[in-house]
Image (spheres, rainbow, N blue to C red):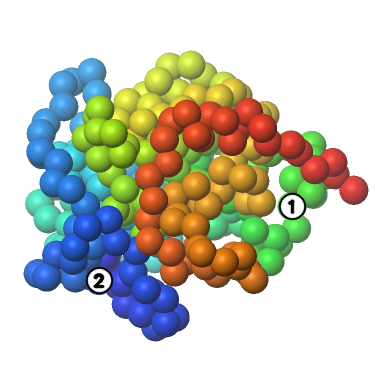
Amino acid sequence: MAHKGIVASLKRRGLPIPRATTDDQRTGWPKAPTRRRERRSTAMTKTLGIIGSGMIGSTIARLAVTAGLDVVISNSRGPRTLQAQVADLGPQARAATPAEAARAADLVVAAVPLGAIGQLPADALAGKTVIDAMNHYPERDGGLLPLESGELTSSELVQHHLPGAHVVKALNNVFFAHLAVLARPAGAPDRSALPVAGDDPSAVAATVALLDVLGYDGVPFGTLADSWRTEPGTAVQAVPYAQAPATEPESWDWIFQAPAAPASAARIRALLDSAARTPAP
């Protein structure tokens, strides 16, 4: 099962499971405060397509079905490999190919390794709002000259690959296990916020609306050219959503062990505003 697989992965690495409250003893997944499941109006996203069934894609799928959305999830290995995950998610989820997920959805999340963006079906995604939840990790994705030179941000590269889509950067800056447990109802004092950037104002608004459904505030901060402010190595990456250790950590591994901690819209906005870009060599 998807969430049990995530928990097992953390346990294999000897890492504690971040918690928001107490464990759900039936599923073994950390239990966030209960949010009422409801159908959204026809003006809102009703069907969410997800391309990529790894940690982030699976976590977003869980949040979406909890919020009452229909989910069409896909990966590069085919729908048959997703049957257990879909059964665990329940009747609001189904497996498909990436192209089928793109066509069926009101809005699509792309959550594959950036080096695999060739798997994203450009034709099927034309006209769609596509949330880019991907990051560039050179050790995994290989060197990508337009990114290394600073010519493009990773989201601009995705937009080049998907010329007919409306790409929005979001859901890329939080550790998946923290994302799973920090969702809160609108207006909750401990609700967390996630940054959002895009060139199309309507697509940005649709993404902010989706985040609200999933249990987060959205913080729009600029265009895809500005999305470097949330890329790996920036202050808004992962750290704001983790409880800080008592002593200075020796590496970033502490984030994977830390309990989740809420990050307000004001804090995320301040971190975005203070970001400084390192010049390309």
Query: What is the quadrant of the N terminus in the image?
Result: bottom left
Residue at 16% x, 21% y: name it. 41
Q: Amino acid at mark 2?
A: Lys
Q: Is residue 218 left or right of residue 280?
A: left
Q: Is residue 213 visible?
A: no
Q: Could you tell me residue 61's position as x and y percent?
A: 28, 50
Q: Amino acid at mark 1?
A: Leu
Residue at 9% x, 69% y: name it. 26
Residue marked by disc 2:
4
Residue at 51% x, 52% y: name it. 238
User: Foreground: 184 or 125?
Assistant: 184
Above or below, 207 against 20 in this view is above
Residue at 51% x, 19% y: name it. 200
For the residues labelled 1 and 2, say whether their Cβ atoms are less than 8 Å apart.
no
Q: CA distance from mark 1 to mark 2?
A: 34 Å
Q: Could you tell me residue 219's position as x and y percent?
A: 46, 28
Counting other residues with Cα less than 10 Å from the Cα at mark 1, is it few (<14), some (14-19), or many (20 or more)?
some
Counting other residues with Cα less than 10 Å from the Cα at mark 2, is it few (<14), some (14-19), or many (20 or more)?
some
Q: Could you tell me residue 166's position as x and y percent?
A: 49, 27
User: Foreground: 146 or 31?
Assistant: 31
Above or below, 52 against 16 in this view is above
Residue marked by disc 1:
144
Q: Could you tell me residue 172's position as x and y percent?
A: 50, 46
Q: Is residue 22 visible?
A: yes
Q: Which element carries disc 1, helix, strand or loop?
A: loop
Q: Which element carries disc 2, helix, strand or loop?
A: helix
Above or below, 104 against 20 in this view is above
